[in-house]
Amino acid sequence: MERGRRRWWTTIVSVFAAVVIAAAALSGAFQFAVLALPSYRDDLSSWVTKTAGRPVQIGGINLVWRNFLPQIDLSDITLYSVDGKEEVLSADRLSVGFGLLRLITGDLTPTRVELAGLSLEANIDENGKFSVMGFEDANDPDAPDYSRWLKDLTRFQRVSLKDCE
């Protein structure tokens, strides 16, 4: 009987030690990424500019660990018009969270998006056509279909807008 208890105790202690070691290794890798990430602000800004098709300015970038999940926090984000002269959209903070299971499988789609301090101007005309200032003309027949864009939002587990104008 005593021998069986010792085996269980040894197994439990071994599993606990393995979890602690794995957590320490993960924390070390995370800290290394935090130290390396600020140097990528210009690269990230260039990538977002290319993806959005218009100039984007990112004030700060930080990698944080929130609720056991990695998250990228961008601060002082400004999206400009295509010509780069007019500020179209600005936000104090954009947080993008990633699920560990998605990251392990190679899926870089965020699970959570939180936008704080958003400032933009949106209009709905008499025909019910939705437009955002600086993105397109509401009378343009080639304007993008926002229903598809809104449907794409369902990929996220959580989308949050805070302190928006």
Image (spheres, helix red, strand yellow):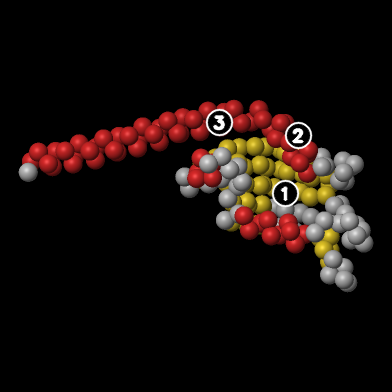
Where residue 55 appears, as percent x and y from the top left, is 81, 40
Image quadrant where one finds the N terminus = top left
> For the residue marked with disc 2, what is the amino acid?
Ser
Judge whether 88 appears above or below 124 on screen: above
Residue farthest front in this picture: 105
Is residue 124 rendered to the left or right of residue 24?
right
Where residue 94 appears, as percent x and y from the top left, is 66, 47
For disc 3, the marked residue is 33
Q: Residue at x 42, y 30 (%)?
A: 25
Image quadrant where one finds the C terminus = bottom right
User: What's the distance in space between the residues labelled 1 and 3, CA to CA?
Assistant: 25 Å
Chain-order first, disc 2 or disc 3: 3
Label drawn at residue 91: 1
Judge whether 62 appears above or below 66 on screen: above
Q: Residue at x 86, y 52 (%)?
A: 134
Chain-order first, disc 2 or disc 1: 2
For disc 2, the marked residue is 46
Is residue 72 rendered to the left or right of residue 5?
right
Residue farthest right in this picture: 139
